[in-house]
């Protein structure tokens, strides 16, 4: 398995530039995956060190044999705990390329894609207890309605939730192929594949508690960054991007920016990039996944 096949990193140059790498600094790649971003960071390190996090055991095949690199098989929501295990209290930069890797999408047995027949799994950590199959076959109608509407922005979420409960009582859901065939009855004509993607996204986010993990990671990232340390986060849908944007701009996930007596913003980070950085047309043509990517760069406020 090669890194090129496993996953093509999006906006590689912009990500490494955003980190403003000190060759002797300490960095974290929170979404190691195929290792593309990590190798680019290592290329700029001298006596520095890089910690790569990934909860998916498949990523182990891509770990470089490099004394400047340490692989941590863990969810990035536990960033601070694992860094402390290695005696690291503060770092110079943190990179997170959110979402799902090309390898996970293209591996039928993982159940992430509507393009392949496989079990309804969708666990990024394959030892986790709850899969998409359990969500579809055990969640009550109200909970299904909530996740389909909130995480997938599915317009007929209530109708679909009712139908899922009715259908599973006759025949429990087990395969991506069978579930996709079921979804066809509820998809807008001509927009079937978009509809499938929305539903699968909602299930994937729920199975992996992606929004909860992201909030925890971002708060811990702020804690472990050195003053003026860089946070570089790439997201692929509005729910993720909104959390990242709000934390950078307002210092919190919800509510308005607060200011001190002198009118200065009260927030732990300040934006480096003006708005979100997006891929250019050439990259999008070469790697269609880049189309939805939004990259935000911030640095920790120096007190």
Image (cartoon, rainbow, N blue to C red):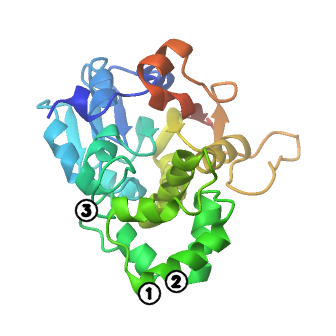
The secondary element bearing badge 3 is classed as loop
Q: What residue is at 44 percent from the left and 38 percent from the top?
A: 97
Residue furthest top as drawn: 282
Judge whether 188 appears above or below 284 on screen: below
Picture disc at residue 126:
3
Q: Report the residue marked by disc 1.
A: 169
Please name whichever residue, 233 or 100, is drawn nearer the observer in this view of the structure. Answer: 100
Q: In which quarter of the image is residue 268?
A: top right
Q: Looking at the rendering, which quadrant does residue 75 occupy?
A: bottom left
Report x, y in % for residue 169. 44, 87
Query: Does residue 166 appear anywhere in the picture?
Result: yes
Residue 83 location (% of width, % of height): 32, 50
Q: How far across and how far down the image is residue 191, in percent?
A: 60, 46
Q: Nearer the viewer, mark 3 or mark 2?
A: 2
Can residue 86 be spotted in the picture? no
Say whether disc 3 or disc 2 marks the residue closer to the N-terminus. 3
Q: Which residue lies furthest to the bottom in this view?
A: 169
Question: Mark 2 — residue?
Answer: 166
Q: In which quarter of the image is the N terminus?
A: top left
Q: In this view, does 14 lie above or below 30?
A: above
Mark 1 nearby-residue class (10 Å; few <14, some 14–19, many ≥20): few
**How far is the residue under mark 1 from the one under mark 2?**
6 Å
Q: Quadrant of the C terminus?
A: top right
């Amino acid at each position: 398995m090669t890194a090129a096949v496993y996953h093509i990193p999006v906006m590689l140059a912009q990500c490494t530039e955003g980190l403003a790498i000190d060759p002797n600094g300490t960095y974290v790649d929170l979404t190691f995956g195929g290792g593309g971003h990590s190798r680019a960071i290592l290329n700029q390190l001298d006596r520095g060190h890089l910690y790569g996090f990934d909860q998916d055991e498949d990523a182990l095949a891509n770990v470089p044999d490099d004394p400047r690199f340490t692989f941590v098989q863990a969810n990035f929501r536990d960033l601070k705990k694992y860094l402390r295990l290695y005696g690291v209290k503060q770092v110079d930069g943190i990179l997170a390329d959110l979402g799902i890797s090309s390898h996970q999408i293209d591996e039928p047995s993982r159940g992430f894609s509507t393009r392949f027949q496989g079990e309804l799994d969708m666990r990024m950590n394959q030892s986790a207890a709850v899969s998409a199959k359990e969500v579809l076959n055990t969640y009550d109608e109200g909970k299904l309605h909530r996740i389909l509407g909130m995480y997938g922005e599915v317009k007929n979420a209530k109708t679909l939730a009712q139908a899922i409960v009715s259908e599973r009582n006759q025949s429990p859901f087990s395969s991506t192929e069978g579930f996709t065939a079921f979804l066809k009855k509820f998809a807008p004509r001509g927009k079937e594949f978009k509809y499938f993607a929305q539903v699968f996204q909602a299930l994937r986010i729920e199975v992996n508690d992606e929004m909860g993990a992201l909030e925890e990671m971002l708060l811990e990232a702020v804690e472990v960054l050195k003053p003026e340390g860089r946070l570089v986060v790439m997201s692929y849908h509005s729910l993720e991007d909104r959390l990242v944007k709000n934390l950078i701009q307002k210092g919190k996930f919800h509510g308005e920016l607060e200011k001190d007596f002198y009118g200065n913003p009260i927030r732990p980070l300040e934006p480096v990039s003006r708005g979100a950085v997006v891929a250019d047309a050439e990259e999008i043509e070469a790697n269609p996944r880049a189309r939805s990517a939004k990259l935000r760069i911030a640095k920790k406020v120096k007190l």
